[in-house]
């Protein structure tokens, strides 16, 4: 009991250090406004609604998910009839990230603006830039945590131990805080052959580097470090029958490094010369490398008439697996569910097609 609680605390407190990373999604392209503000309005339609839910390490705590992250966004692609081969994108994204039954709870409300422009015949090259700003509100309730020093031997307790918070000696700042956030990004795409596209983007997050206030009366100042994210992929359409999508994501934050790479294959179960009328079934296998940890991520998805749905499952296979087994867990894991819809109120011009990355 004592060991299990102590390891749980170690998992949770580790996210507060400067080496911890921001939220991340395995289906990162399914949540474009949390990936890169340059993707705001970068889709072939008038509006886009996106939702994603991530549940990480279910079973680590007895009651609620150890880590839970839902997000929803709405963005628009505007002025497409007035901006030749381009558009103005505006959007809003809400993110909630919570740990251990809201022991630590973060809400983000961010507004995005992006400008997308195309070059060449049929906009074979596209470039977008974007900016994002808003509020980050976090609330901590450290009274829900139990620390190693607070346990003492108690023969009357069936576990052999009891807990006294006065023995823990921790001085943590419970309460609510509000901070300002600002992010920026760039995104480019080129269709070097019909049905063959390459795209890549870069985003810089946490430009305000707001202060973290977890320890009361601390002489040290802890600030959220900058996060650099590089992402991209290829798309190969195979005679309107299938599509192959290899891709990658690499991000750094302070001393943390994360690399994602993999392949998604889509079969057009309903074929149509118009891509917006096709129905496509997707299967993918991706990998995540993070220092000594390795995660394998199978994915599945479906797309039809503007609707996209996806599911991803993370299975940690290295050090996190060993740590999880030490506290009685079966396997450290996570799953994600995504759903999005791109709608239109007008028929876009053929030479004003805006590319929307998939999975």
Image (cartoon, rainbow, N blue to C red):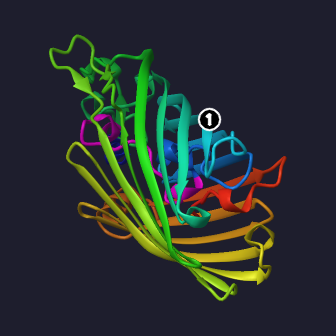
User: Which residue extends farthest left?
Assistant: 219
Q: Quadrant of residue 27?
A: bottom right
Q: Quadrant of residue 282?
A: bottom right
The residue where tag 1 is placed is 90
In the displayed structure image, the side of residue 12 where residue 35 appears, left or right: right
Closer to the camera in the image, 268 or 251: 268
Q: Whole-percent x and y of residue 3?
A: 31, 47
Closer to the camera in the image, 187 or 298: 187
Residue 331 visible from this viewpoint? no
Q: Residue at x 83, y 49 (%)?
A: 346
Q: Which residues fall within the magenta stretch?
A: 12-30
User: Which residue extends farthest right?
Assistant: 345
In the displayed structure image, the side of residue 217 where residue 259 appears, left or right: right
Give the vertical position of 72 relative to 216 (above or below): below
Q: Quadrant of residue 279?
A: bottom right
Give the vertical position of 127 relative to 191 (above or below): above
Q: Residue at x 32, y 37 (%)?
A: 13
- What is the secondary structure assignment of the residue under circle 1? strand
Q: Whole-percent x and y of residue 289?
A: 32, 65
Residue 82 colored in magenta in the image: no
In the displayed structure image, the side of residue 335 where residue 250 appears, left or right: left
Q: Residue at x 61, y 39 (%)?
A: 88
Q: Quadrant of the C terminus?
A: bottom right
Q: Residue at x 66, y 69 (%)?
A: 301
Q: Whole-percent x and y of residue 334?
A: 51, 58
Query: Crowding at label 1, few (<14), some or many (≥20) Cα neighbours within 10 Å?
Result: many
Residue 327 visible from this viewpoint? yes
């Amino acid at each position: 009991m004592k060991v299990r609680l102590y390891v749980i605390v170690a998992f949770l407190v580790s996210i507060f250090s400067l080496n911890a990373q921001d939220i991340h999604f395995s289906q990162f392209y399914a949540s474009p406004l949390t990936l890169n503000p340059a993707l705001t309005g970068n889709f072939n339609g008038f509006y886009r609604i996106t939702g994603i839910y991530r549940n990480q390490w279910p079973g680590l705590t007895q009651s609620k998910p150890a880590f839970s992250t839902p997000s929803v966004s709405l963005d628009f692609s505007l002025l497409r009839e007035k901006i030749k081969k381009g558009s103005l994108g505006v959007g809003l994204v809400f993110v909630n990230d919570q740990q251990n039954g809201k022991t630590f709870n973060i809400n983000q409300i961010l507004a995005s603006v992006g400008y997308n422009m195309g070059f060449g015949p049929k906009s074979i090259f596209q470039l977008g830039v974007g900016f994002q700003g808003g509020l980050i509100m976090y609330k901590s309730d450290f009274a829900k945590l139990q620390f190693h020093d607070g346990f003492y031997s108690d023969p009357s307790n069936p576990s052999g131990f009891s807990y006294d918070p006065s023995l823990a000696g921790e001085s943590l700042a419970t309460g609510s805080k509000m901070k300002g956030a600002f992010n920026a990004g760039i995104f480019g795409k080129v269709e070097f052959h019909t049905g063959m596209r390459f795209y890549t983007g870069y985003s810089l997050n946490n430009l305000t580097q707001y202060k973290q206030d977890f320890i009361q009366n601390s002489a040290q100042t802890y600030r959220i470090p900058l996060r650099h994210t590089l992402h991209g992929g290829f798309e190969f359409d195979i005679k309107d029958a299938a599509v192959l999508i290899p891709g990658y994501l690499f991000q750094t934050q302070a001393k943390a490094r994360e690399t994602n790479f993999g392949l998604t294959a889509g079969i057009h179960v309903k074929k149509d010369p118009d891509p917006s009328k096709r129905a496509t079934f997707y299967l993918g296998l991706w990998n995540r490398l993070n220092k000594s940890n390795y995660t394998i991520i199978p994915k599945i998805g479906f797309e039809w008439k503007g609707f996209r749905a996806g599911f991803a499952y993370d299975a940690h296979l290295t050090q996190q697996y060993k740590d999880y087994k030490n506290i009685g867990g079966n396997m450290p894991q996570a799953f994600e569910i995504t759903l999005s819809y791109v709608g239109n109120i007008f028929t876009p011009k053929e030479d004003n097609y805006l590319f929307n990355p998939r999975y």
